[in-house]
Each structure stands twice: as C-alpha cells, then as structure tokens.
Amino acid sequence: MTSVPGHSDDLFGLSGRTALVTGAGSGIGRACAVALARAGAKVHLVDRDRDSVTGVARETGGTEHVVDLAGPDPAADLPAEVDVLVNNAGLQHVAPVHEFPPDRFELLQKVMVTAPFLLARHVLPHMYQRGWGRVVNLSSVHGVRASAFKSAYVAAKHGLEGLSKVIALEGAPHGVTSNCVSPGYVRTPLVENQVADQARAHGIEPDRVLSEVLLTRHAIKQLVEPDEVAAVVLWLCGPHSGHVTGSSFTIDGGWTAQ
C-alpha cells in the first residue's frame, strides 16, 4: 500500500489501485497525487518539469515520469496498467482571436484534448479487462462558459468535456466511469502568473486583480484551493461514485449559478 508520511489510512478504498496523474508537479495535479496516495493508491506522476515532479514523487512514494504531453505519442513510455487516470495538465495563452498565434492554439489542444485522448486510449483496455476504472478530467468553468481572449483554452476545455462524456458512455458496460471536475480560478502557478500579468497590465495591486478582474464572476471572492479540487477528484475515484459518470462538477464559487 502506498502511503504519504504521517498518513496510513485507506479512506477511499484505493489500496491495490494504480493511478496516473498528469501535471503532477504542482497545483491541482500535486494535490490530486497526494490525495490518491493517502487513499492507498500507487501513483504515477507525469510532468515535464523534472525537479517539481521528483519532489512530489518523494512526497507520495510515487513514480515520476518526465513527459512532454505535446509530443507525438506521450503515452508511449507510460504504464498501461492504470486503474485511475487523472488528466490534469494544462496551460494558458491570452490573446484576441485575430491575433492568436496558431501554433499556441494547436499546443493547447495537444496538451488538453489530444493527450487526454491518447492516455485514455492507452489505459482503457486494462480498465475494461479488470471491470473497473476511473477517468477524471480536470476541465474548468471555461468548459461550460466562455471568456474573451481565451479561445484556445475555452475550445480545449469544451472539447475535453465532450471527450469525457464519450468515454463515460463507452466505459459504462465495463465498470469504468468518466467525469469532469470544472473549477473556477484556483490558487495554482498558472493563475498566480495571470494575477501578476494582470497587475502589470492594469497598474494595480495583485489583491485588486483578484477582486476586480479574475473573481468578478465568483460569488465567493476567494481563489479555490487545490486541496478542495483534489477532494472532489478523490471522491469520484472512490467506492461511492460508481453510478456517477458523464457528469461535470463545478467548483466555481457560484460563477455558473448566475
């Protein structure tokens, strides 16, 4: 049984299961890897940043894999014997459509749509053979809503939501569920970089960026914490969610309630 130092509990019945988490070096991916390891899973950690993923591997007792998900076959050197797949890796680029660099648009699709497809394709035969599996895709509120200047990100997250539903329908006869977790703005390096960029662009303090720019559509004027997202991911991988599939769970501070 895999365990995190100081935690030997198998809270969600994942002892004996193997999980693979992308973008595991920081933010939501790291939080998910830690949560899954605490629940008893053996974790494989995928990230392109060797230093960060090595640190999380030490923390969780997991196995690190340095992989560029934008490559031609990101699944080639990754294990196929995976029971839980968490597609989390992502990136952002902000520009109006008429100025958006086509290569950046394509890159975001590769990392956030094509790579999840290839990874699912890689691990689903094992899940089907065992009659059990969990696919959790880290989408975004931008998987169900749009914002100006984020065409590539919004398109990718909408695509990921669709892919997740197809996997849910195909996996259902085999005991495999597929769902999206769709947060608003989370306290991650990606968002913190956006805060810094917006502060410079608007000439205001970072705290004002949160309240006046990023969180204007959040009813709760606080960033979501990575651990809060990981808790939902963990529940979707546990024993009480076998009939939950093809769904998208928003953690958006009330954004989509408006």
Image: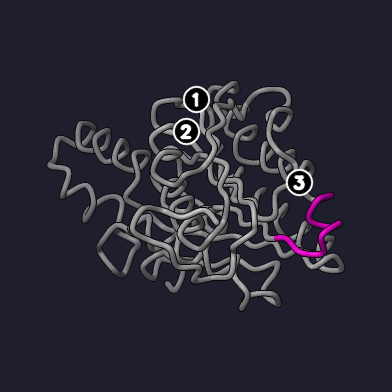
In the picture, the disc for residue 123 is: 3
Q: Amino acid at mark 3?
A: Val
| Image: 43 above or below 133 | above
Q: Nearer the viewer, residue 47 or 108?
A: 47
Q: Residue at x 33, y 64 (%)?
A: 218
**Whole-percent x, y for residue 219 in the image:** 31, 69
Residue picked out by circle 1 = 99
| Image: 146 above or below 257 | above
Dominant SS of magenta comes to helix
Do the residues bearing badges 2 and 1 touch, measured as CB atoms within 8 Å? yes
Residue picked out by circle 2 = 96
- Rounded to the nearest angstrom, the CA distance separating label 3 from label 1 is 38 Å
**Whole-percent x, y for residue 49 in the image:** 45, 26
- Rounded to the nearest angstrom, the CA distance separating label 3 from label 2 is 37 Å
Q: Which residues are magenta?
A: 125-133
Of discs 3 and 1, which sits in the foreground?
Answer: 3
Instruction: Check if residue 183 falls in the magenta segment.
Output: no
- Give the mark nearer the N terminus: 3 vs 2: 2
The secondary element bearing badge 2 is classed as loop
Q: Amino acid at mark 2?
A: Pro
Q: Residue at x 55, y 52 (%)?
A: 138
Q: Quadrant of residue 69?
A: top right
Packing grade of label 3 (10 A; few <14, some 14-19, many >=20) is: many
Image quarter where the C terminus lies is bottom left
Q: Amino acid at mark 1?
A: Glu
Q: Nearer the viewer, residue 186 or 26?
A: 26
**Whole-percent x, y for residue 196 in the image:** 24, 35
- Give the mark nearer the N terminus: 3 vs 1: 1
| Image: 13 above or below 189 | below
Q: Nearer the viewer, residue 189 or 206?
A: 189
